[in-house]
Image: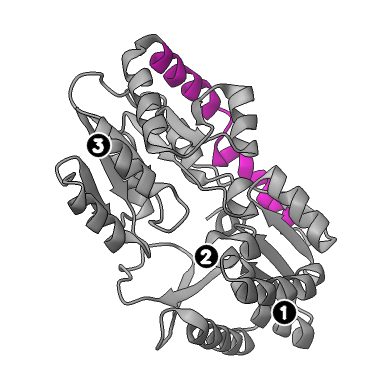
Amino acid sequence: MSLFTAGHQVWLVGRQKKDSLALPDRPYQQIRLQCSTQKGKTFYLEYNLRLLAFLFWHPCDIINAVDLDTLLPCSLIKKWRKTPIIYDAHEYFSQTAEVVRRPKIQKAWEELALKLIPKANRCYTVGPQLAKIMGKAYGVHFDVVRNLPMRIPSSIPYHKESGKKIILYQGMLNEGRGLETAIEAMQHLNGFELWLVGNGDIKEALEKKVRALNLEECVLFHGFIPPDHLKDFTQQAWLGLNLLENNGLSYYYSLANKAFDYIQYGVPSIQMAFPEYQALQDEYDVFELLDELDAWVLADKIKQLSTNTKRYRQLQVNCSIAAKELNWEKEEKKLLEIYTL
């Protein structure tokens, strides 16, 4: 929307999944490519071929390659047509949890990254630490454009202390997100509900775990919620969660947009004591940080915050102050500058 509002003609290209919802109404072009396979090596091959064909038949002035799994066809088009590429790294792809546990797959992605990323005209990623380590790894400069939410009216009320306290996780239900630990912690938390808002590869396994622990009444799966409606859940939360396992540099140096969403809605949250979250905490004091991913430790942290009303309300106030700085209206200037090639 920022690029469209700035006067650019934008085409957003993705893929059609079996469970894809209807596309939201937007003023820019939205295209979904049809693939016969949905995952694995065959999917990546098919999607890249279909994306290559689409780019070949739809010339453009700039290509924004989102993450490493779209970069090859974009690079081929650049070679043929001299079309500039902007590489948008949402994560350190070869260091993600799903990749690091498969050495041969990781090596293949890393070789592709070393060959293609240095050829991009501009690169950017979601946080300062990722920008540094990827810049060093690939010998190019990475700008930083954080995934910040739009500013919301300050009149949105704080969570009321009465009633059941809702602990919210919003995002993908994928491995390495600490979701199993969050569910296990609910065994030790009476009077709380855990809301999991999102979908992903391990949803069925998480549902099975909830049934095995007899936690169906306090762990609720809300499924995928369109971004425009996510606020309806966020503003009901008493506490937000962003729990990551330290099983790859991508997670360790991450800066998730959900952390900023919680801040924008005045919702204190628990984050891992990883570098980017520690840096935000040092500046704004809007989190409770977790040094280790353990169900007992997490439950104890939540209990302490529940009984320490003064601390909880101070975190709310700090979120309100930080929200005035950590919003997309200010951050989008960095994005628009990158596209002035």
Residue name at image x 67 percent, y 53 percent: 125
Question: Earlier along the polypeptide chain: callout 2 or callout 3?
Answer: 2
Whole-percent x, y for residue 250 in the image: 62, 54
User: Is 231 within the magenta?
Assistant: no
Mark 3 residue type: Gln
Rate crowding at label 2 as few (under 14), some (14 to 19) or many (20 or more) other CA atoms within 10 Å. some
Front residue of 14/243: it is 243
Please give the residue where the numbered disc 2 appears in the rendered image: 98
Say which mark, if any, is on residue 187: 3
Q: CA distance from mark 2 to mark 1?
A: 24 Å
Front residue of 21/286: it is 286
Circle 3/circle 1 CB separation < 8 Å: no
Residue name at image x 57 percent, y 67 percent: 99
Mark 1 residue type: Ser
In this picture, residue 200 sits left or right of residue 112: left
Whole-percent x, y for residue 295 in the image: 37, 37
Please give the residue where the numbered disc 1 appears in the rendered image: 75
Q: CA distance from mark 2 to mark 3?
A: 28 Å
Magenta residues span 311-339
